[in-house]
Image: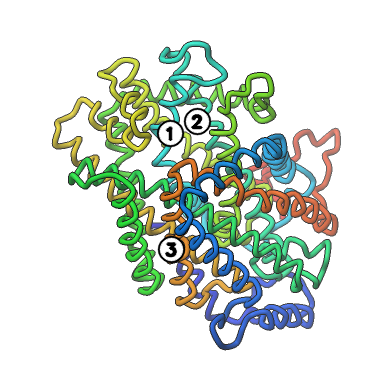
Amino acid sequence: MRNPINKVLESMEAESTREQTDNPREPKQPSRQRAMLKGREAQLRSASGLFIGLNPVVASITILAVVAFVVLGSVWTDQATELFTQMRDETLVLFKSWYVLLVAAILVFVLWLGFGRYKNVRLGRQDEAPEFGLFSWFAMLFAAGMGIGLIFWSVAEPILHFQGNPFITNGGTPAAATTAMRLAFFHWGMHAWAVYAFVGLSLSYFAYRLSLPLSIRSAFWPLIGRRIYGPVGHTVDVFAVLGTVFGVATSLGLGVQQLNTGLNVVAGVPTGEVPQLVIIALVTTVALLSVILGVRRGVRVLSDLNMYLTFALLVFLLIFGPTLYLAGFFLTTLGEYLHNLPLLSFWTDVNHNDGWQERWTLFYWAWWVAWAPFVGLFIARISRGRKIREFIMGVLLVPTLLTGLWLIIFGGTALHVELFGSGGITAAVNQNVTGGLYALFAGLEVHASLQWLLSVLVTILIAVYFVTSCDSGTLAITTILSVGDSEPPVRHRVVWGIGVGAIAAVLLASGGVTALQAAVIAAGLPFSLIMAIMAYALVIALRDEEAAPRRTPDQGRAEEPWTGRSKISGVKET
């Protein structure tokens, strides 16, 4: 079966070759105004020289920041480690409540958008059909949410929560297992996808509805108008790029540690800082080759491989794992998650401050915020033509369920081995968080050759996700730097691929997971403030849209939220 994610790659190629003014999908806007805005975008891009095709102001600032970070972190490694730890601690002390409130508010906000008065606004012309079918769209959303981070934590996080967390008194019990999986669901569930959905919706609305650049700066149009092409817009894009750089670098850093452990298990490669730096160099080189080869020959092949390996692993664990236990555990955890969602959303451990929330919830919230420009941009690319209600329900609910399914199959199987099997996974995770995944395979009641084969497959999967994350991350970064150009020059993507790999290497050398967490928490903070302003700007922009009609008492429930069909007449609304 053909990988549905390739459809968006074909769309990107086609869009880069057609004129926007001849596009029949163009939203309602005077042609003179469209031409003027396109002219502003072109003026921001350098026509020649080192930064050809990019905004030279934003590109130069971000490159200088990255170079300075890499040089200082490489020369003064010990001081960098101390600085990262101090930045993390001070940021979490001062902005703990801010992160908790922001992400909870974003979840409420996107739910209001999906069910409120602007739910019928279409991301494009009002009579425009979605560019992709539902199946392809869901498949691509799942691909956007899958990555190195989920593989890294899918076993380690439930096992660590299983041993102790603020919501249990005794670890290692069946009740502790339920709580542990509920917390994993919470961290990877609707809050994460609400952040992505909000940024993706904002980008889609201003790009496809108002014909503005597919860039973060466009979200400020209702507040400052054409000044988005000036210093304010440059500042917004700088913070968006830096947040994306450190967010992607964090994922790559985690992936390298996991990949190093996998190579040690399957091939005896030694673990440690030097092998990890070598792995970063090698895999980054492969990622750059995929960039140079182009979309069709590079990323497309890797995307296909990702899909097949992921499906194979899930099916194998479902067949040879505790299938009935996993089915019941999924339903139990889903109910626990929904029941405790309001409490967890606003919970802060002010009376039991042992650092758990900082290590887990706040790290995740900052990570999702830092990743939001990257994932949001991808979601925007594949969501043109959908109504807001369909966009919110699709982006918020479907990936949450699929991510929860992955967590249950991997994390649930690990908990089953600990509770009812041979055990050993807890000890492996406590020794090295990257070892839990491979200890899980060793704990399955299958032949040793199959255990080794699983280890090989998941190691290949991690390597491929490393490459595709680097490739997609550089595309997102250079798209923002080029003021929304969907096909920025390849040489710039190569430069940023090297930069992201270098940052991941410096962070690993400066403290491993601690440094990675510190960097993403600090990098996500400026963009979290930008997101708050984006929400206000989006509300102002939507005021000019036609609101959904309110129900009359004799109508009952006017329409089904997902299909848009009247329950009374069965006629689809226009």
Callout 3: few (<14), some (14-19), or many (20+) C-alpha neighbours within 10 Å?
A: many
- Where residue 156 appears, x then y in whole percent? 40, 32
- Where residue 137 appears, x then y in whole percent? 51, 53
Residue at 34 percent across and 70 percent down: it is: 289
Say if 179 sits above or below 296 in the image.
above
Residue at 29 percent across and 30 percent down: it is: 440
Q: Which residue is mark 3?
A: 471
- Left/right of residue 17 with respect to residue 275 in the rendered view: right
Residue at 36 percent across and 45 percent down: it is: 257
523, 489: nearer the viewer: 523
535, 304: nearer the viewer: 535
Q: Are marks 1 and 3 in contact (CB under 8 Å)?
A: no
> Quarter of the image containing the N terminus?
bottom left
**Element at label 3:** helix
**Element at label 2:** helix
- Where residue 344 appears, x then y in whole percent? 63, 26
- Where residue 550 appears, x then y in whole percent? 84, 42
Is residue 530 visible in this depiction of the protein? yes
Q: Earlier in the sequence, mark 2 or mark 1?
A: 2
Say if 539 sits above or below 513 in the image.
below
Q: Are marks 2 and 1 in contact (CB under 8 Å)?
A: yes
- Left/right of residue 85 with respect to residue 206 in the rendered view: left
How much space separates mark 1 and mark 3, taking CA atoms?
25 Å
Residue at 47 percent across and 34 percent down: it is: 404
How much space separates mark 3 and mark 2, taking CA atoms?
28 Å
Q: Earlier in the sequence, mark 3 or mark 2?
A: 2
Q: Which residue is mark 2?
A: 184
Point out the residue furthest to the bottom here.
Answer: 48
- The residue type indicated by label 3 comes to Asp
Q: Which residue is mark 1?
A: 407
